[in-house]
Amino acid sequence: MGKKTPQDIVRKWMKAGKVKKKCCRSKSRCKKCPVLALKKAKTKLAAAA
């Protein structure tokens, strides 16, 4: 299986349609922001370890 990285998790969320491909920066940060999703994935992996 290999090691999961935060980028892999965010890529999976993008395919599922939960995260956008690019950050629009038009709003402060929308719920589908990839930048926030990456932060969330990093904390998720840190909590699991």
Image: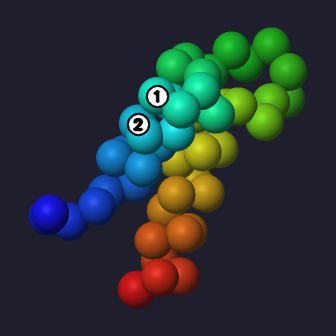
Residue 46 location (% of width, % of height):
47, 77
Q: How is the image coloured?
A: rainbow
Q: Which residue has dot 1 on it?
A: 15
Q: Is residue 34 above or below residue 39?
A: above
Depth check: give the residue in front, 4 or 15.
15
**Most extreme residue toward the right, as rendered?**
27
Helix, strand or loop at label 1? It is helix
Q: Amino acid at mark 1?
A: Lys
Quadrant containing the C terminus in the rendered view: bottom left
Residue 44 location (% of width, % of height):
54, 69
Q: Amino acid at mark 2?
A: Arg
Q: What residue is drawn where x is 52% and y is 47%?
A: 38
Q: What residue is drawn where x is 54% and y is 32%?
A: 16
Depth check: give the residue in front, 32 or 23.
32
Quadrant containing the N terminus in the rendered view: bottom left
Residue 20 location (% of width, % of height):
60, 22
Mark 1 crowd level (few <14, some 14–19, many ≥20, 10 Å Cα): few
Q: Of the numbered discs in the image, which one, if any, rests on residue 11?
A: 2
Residue 32 location (% of width, % of height):
70, 31
Q: Are marks 1 and 2 in contact (CB under 8 Å)?
A: yes
